[in-house]
Amino acid sequence: MTPPCSRGPGSPTTPRRRPWARDIATLPWPRARYGLLAERLLQAGAAAVAINVVFEGSSGKGPADDAAMLAMLARHRGRITLAAEMLEPSDSQGAGGLVLVRPELYLPALGGAAPLGLTNLLISDSSALPPHPDAYGRGLLARHGVTAWPSLATSLLQLAGRSSRQDDRNRSLNPYGPEGTLTRLPAWEVLDPERWRQHPLRPRLAGALVLAAALLVLLRSGLRWRLAVLAIALLLQLLAAGVALQQCHRWLPLLAPAGGLVLLGLLHSGDAYRLEGRERRRLRCTFERYVAPSVVAEILADPEAAQGILRGRLLEVTVLFADLQGFTALTRRRSAAGQTELHVRQLNTYLGAMVEVITSHGGTVDKFIGDAVMAVFGSPVGRGVAEEAEAALRCARAMGERLQQLNGAWAAAGLEPLANGVGLASGPVLAGQIGSPQRLEFTVIGDTVNRASRLEGLTRTLQVPICLDAATAERVGPRPDLRLQSLGLQAIKGLDALEVFALAAVAPQAASADAALAGEADA
């Protein structure tokens, strides 16, 4: 550092009138000023500080000066190294021996002599230096019977936790890089509080903190978020460079940090794009097994909401159970006759047709249980409880009509016809991915599911194709083409007696209109 009398951009013109410049217009400075320099550098992030001044004896500025220096050294013990000198007396002073000049007064605050380093080394023949930088100094000290001391540069690097690399005379740092690699600044820029608050060393530290924060934020998922953070970080760098140039007359290097930040942002954004695409494909594959493609597109419009759907929610839905009647006995007969392939083909044709009907009415195919089909209306997305209940009832009726069409084709081919029953129940369910880590299934569970299954079984006893509970009937309400009739209280296995409703006979024109609507949806 240069003394404060040196002039530069923004340097004080009358240093003696400023409090921080008192008593430093000429050498020697008060030792407390050196302490202030070191302390501010440490506070700015320096790992260690070396003061290249030999403080021999007491301060000429009085005991208060020494007390301030001692207090500073004690506060930062282990981070400050002081200078010492090894002198060889001249002939006029007598021959032999070396004189070690060191700051004896400050050794207790330093914690001993270990943090000291030699600031000079006498070399009688500089034309023939030894290969090792420390060898000459050790040899000279050894000739006088003195234990070798490290140089001030070595002591500084040791305190900073760095390996030392010194010049041939073991007196100064030999930095990695050309002249100017180490930042140099006048002492007054550190001592002046106003100047030091805007010094380039501080914006660099602030910039490092901003960059570190940006790196942490960039780890968050979401392509838009990462690109936004990248743009903000670049803007902050430009602002910091503008402030440094305008207020401190310093150029901040922007190419390397800006380039690194852009590269980092591109890498993170590319990774986010890849992960987001993979997550969308996974969600699409998950939901397309259950719902119509239009519903999948609606779900994927908000991937975070889709994740919430998978984790589990409580929903108001209508559950549909459809099961073939007498299919177990038909399976035994055909298995005995060796007609298993024919049997499976007919079942798959039936199930495929039922899935088409369910999908066309906005339902979600939950699962197949043998020859039974379970569907949900209102999950994973809903159109309203009344709309879902009506869609489920229309779907149940359309499933029966579609089965009649299949039976006509099977009868022409000489195959036995099939008959099914449908149960509908409305109420709350828990919807989400349920199962083990090896096998997860998006499904619904709850009393509503059990009630729909029991109502489907009741169709055999009551000899009606469709049975629904009072909650479903209430949600559907009075409709001219969906007339419901109460079958009274019915005892249901495992449940309390329930009022059961059935679909009354439908006028021919209404049935034809509903069939045409289903046909358009299939097309």
Image: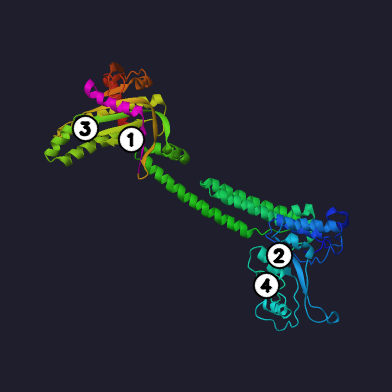
Label 1 and label 3: CA atoms lie apart by 23 Å
Label 4 and label 2: CA atoms lie apart by 17 Å
Q: Position of residue 383 (x, y in %)?
A: 41, 29
Whether 443 is among the magenta residues is yes
Q: Nearer the viewer, residue 133 or 303?
A: 133
Residue under the image location 15 percent in, 36 percent down: 332
**Mark earlier in primary sequence (1, 3):** 1
Residue 115's mark?
2
| Res 123 visible | yes
What range is drawn magenta here?
Answer: 439-465
**Mark earlier in primary sequence (2, 1):** 2
- Label 3 or label 2, whichever lies nearer to me, is 2
Residue 406's mark?
3
- Label 4 or label 1, whichever lies nearer to me, is 4
Q: Secondary structure at mark 4?
A: loop
- Label 1 or label 3, whichever lies nearer to me, is 1
Q: Which residue is mark 4?
A: 166
